[in-house]
Amino acid sequence: MTSELHAQAARLIEARGLQLDAAQQRLLETLGGWLQARLQPSRWRRRAAAGVYLWGGVGRGKSLLLDALLQAAPCTAKRRVHVHALLQEVQQRLLAHAGLADPLARVADELAAEARLFYLDEFHVHDIGDAILLGRLLQPLIERDCILLFSSNYAPAELCPNPLYHSRFKPFAEVLQRHCRVLQMAAGPDYRQQSGQPWGLYLHGPECVLDERLSELPRVTQLALGRQTLALRGMDAHTLWLDFAALCQQPLASSDYLALCQRFPRIVVSALPALAGCSLDEQQRLVNLIDIAYDHGTELWLQSEVPLEVLCAGVGHGDFPRTRSRLAQLRAETMERLAC
């Protein structure tokens, strides 16, 4: 049965000039029916699941469907938040309650008072500490009658692929599976690569050409970031320019990248090497940066001596298909070699 919420979400998508494929249409109908039942429970029906967990391949429209559903939902108190931003927010709220009894319950009280419907986009965890914190937070949010939407490239049991942490991660996956309706997006085309809407630049060519392009950028050489000091190539109020080594070869956290994206509308990263030769930690930091910049709407410029297909070749990191899809949305420019 087509729900009123499904119809409204479909109209919002159509208003953007987009047409859903058959698999997306079926999922949107299922999602709309579930959320309508959750918001308007019936004494004659079993209570709908507290959340929905939608997972599948990159660029298949998971965010498109859940964004439309969130927008259509007749709730005034609703939020969309990226997992990195949520983790930083929770940590900050916990600090405010340091020394008090059960600080995480107090954080859950605050979040539930501010919104009933939460959409956690691009949900993934690689740090076992983050997984445990999120697992401990989700249970009290559900107990406070919050409704949770998740989009992810991974099934719940695959969110934390490191076998060393599997036993500690299992309770978190079980919370998701117990309280959420888990839906898989059918395989199909990566619509991101067909969007034609670049969110930044991929500059293939020598660094000296980038130096010419950014010639008016003040040559600031350092930036304090928490306990770290970043070596810069340049900076003003709008643009931050630094090398890959400064951004990804020292132990920066997701919260650091979020702080940079919140401060600078444009971030320029030069001297990217072929990523297959980088350590997993370096690859993970670049993945985190791209996730956060993409979600935050930060304009990203990347410069490398190698073309994009060479930059991405042979990378085995589990999250890299999503990163490759987002890199493919950058406008590619081949820079002419100048006398440097």
Image (spheres, rainbow, N blue to C red):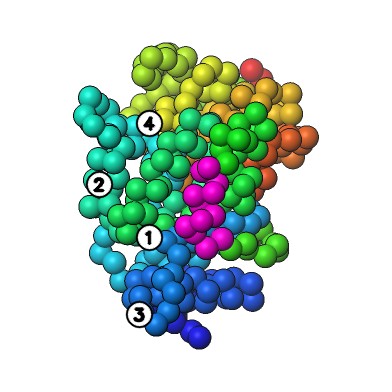
Residue range corresponding to the magenta coloring: 171-182
Look at the image and tell me whether residue 216 can be seen. no
Task: Give me the residue at 51% from left, 47% from top.
Answer: 123
Image quarter hosting the C terminus: top right
Mark 3 vs 4, N-terminal side? 3
Nearer the viewer's eye, disc 3 or disc 4?
3
User: How busy is the neighbourhood of tag 2: few (under 14 within 10 Å), some, or many (20 plus)?
Assistant: some
Check disc 2 and report the residue beneath it. 109
User: How busy is the neighbourhood of tag 3: few (under 14 within 10 Å), some, or many (20 plus)?
Assistant: few
Per the image, is 181 magenta? yes
Check disc 4 and report the residue beneath it. 259
Q: Amino acid at mark 2?
A: Asp
Secondary structure category for the residue under label 1 = strand
Check disc 1 and report the residue beneath it. 147
> To which quarter of the image does residue 48 belong?
bottom left
Q: Amino acid at mark 1?
A: Ile
Task: Give me the residue at 67% from left, 65% from top.
Answer: 186
Residue furthest bottom as drawn: 1
**Front one among 52 and 231:** 52
Question: Mark 4 to mark 1: distance in Å?
Answer: 28 Å
Question: Mark 3 to mark 4: distance in Å?
Answer: 47 Å
Secondary structure category for the residue under label 3 = loop
Q: Is residue 293 left or right of residue 80?
A: right
Which numbered tag is attached to residue 43?
A: 3
Q: Amino acid at mark 4?
A: Ala
Nearer the viewer's eye, disc 4 or disc 1?
1
Q: Amino acid at mark 3?
A: Arg
Q: Are marks 1 and 3 in contact (CB under 8 Å)?
A: no
Q: Are marks 4 and 1 in contact (CB under 8 Å)?
A: no
Question: Residue 216 at what x, y percent from top left?
Answer: 42, 26
